[in-house]
Amino acid sequence: MSTFTTEIAVRFRDVDSMGHVNNAVYATYLEQARAAYFREVLGRDLSAVETVLASLSIDYRAPIDLDDEAVTVEIGVPEIGTASVPMTYTIATDAGVAAEAESVQVSYDADAGESVPLPKDWRSTIREYHDL
């Protein structure tokens, strides 16, 4: 399975009073990585597509410090559903893995208030990109 990788700067505001990146910021790094994925792989602006984040789970492995300057987020798509895109993530610094995460992004019709099938072009692009 091929993965998508992007780098995200660690900002001063990400760091809490304990001197490391606050746990909630990890979710922001994942969101930034998803936005980059949608932009670079699907050619779409995540804020302009009708999807919702249906689930998110993060396993913290090691702290990220301001000295790390940047994190690398790797995204995999192990399978593709009818209306959903499950994603796996690894957040890493030069020192190693800082967190592993999973999410599910669902194609959603806001007017109808329900999930809808993923666009066919997304399905084929995601399958091709990740060798599914």
Image: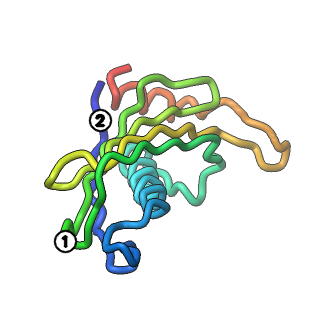
Depicted 78 relative to depicted 121: above or below: above
Residue 23: x and y in percent read 45, 60
Question: Which of these two is toward me, 59 or 116?
Answer: 59
Disc sitting over residue 67 in the figure = 1
Disc sitting over residue 39 in the figure = none
Identified at 64% across, 30% down, the residue is 83
**Label 2 secondary element:** loop
Identified at 36% across, 66% down, the residue is 21
User: With 46 as the anchor, is 51 left or right in this view?
Assistant: right
Q: Amino acid at mark 2?
A: Thr
User: With 100 as the anchor, is 121 left or right in this view?
Assistant: right
Q: Residue furthest front?
A: 18
**Label 1 secondary element:** helix
Q: Amino acid at mark 1?
A: Asp
Residue 40: x and y in percent read 36, 50
User: With 110 as the anchor, is 14 left or right in this view?
Assistant: left
Identified at 28% across, 68% down, the residue is 9
Residue under pointer 2: 3
User: With 31 as the anchor, is 7 left or right in this view?
Assistant: left
Q: Quadrant location of residue 59?
A: top left
Depicted 61 relative to depicted 7: above or below: above
**Quadrant in which the N terminus is drawn:** top left
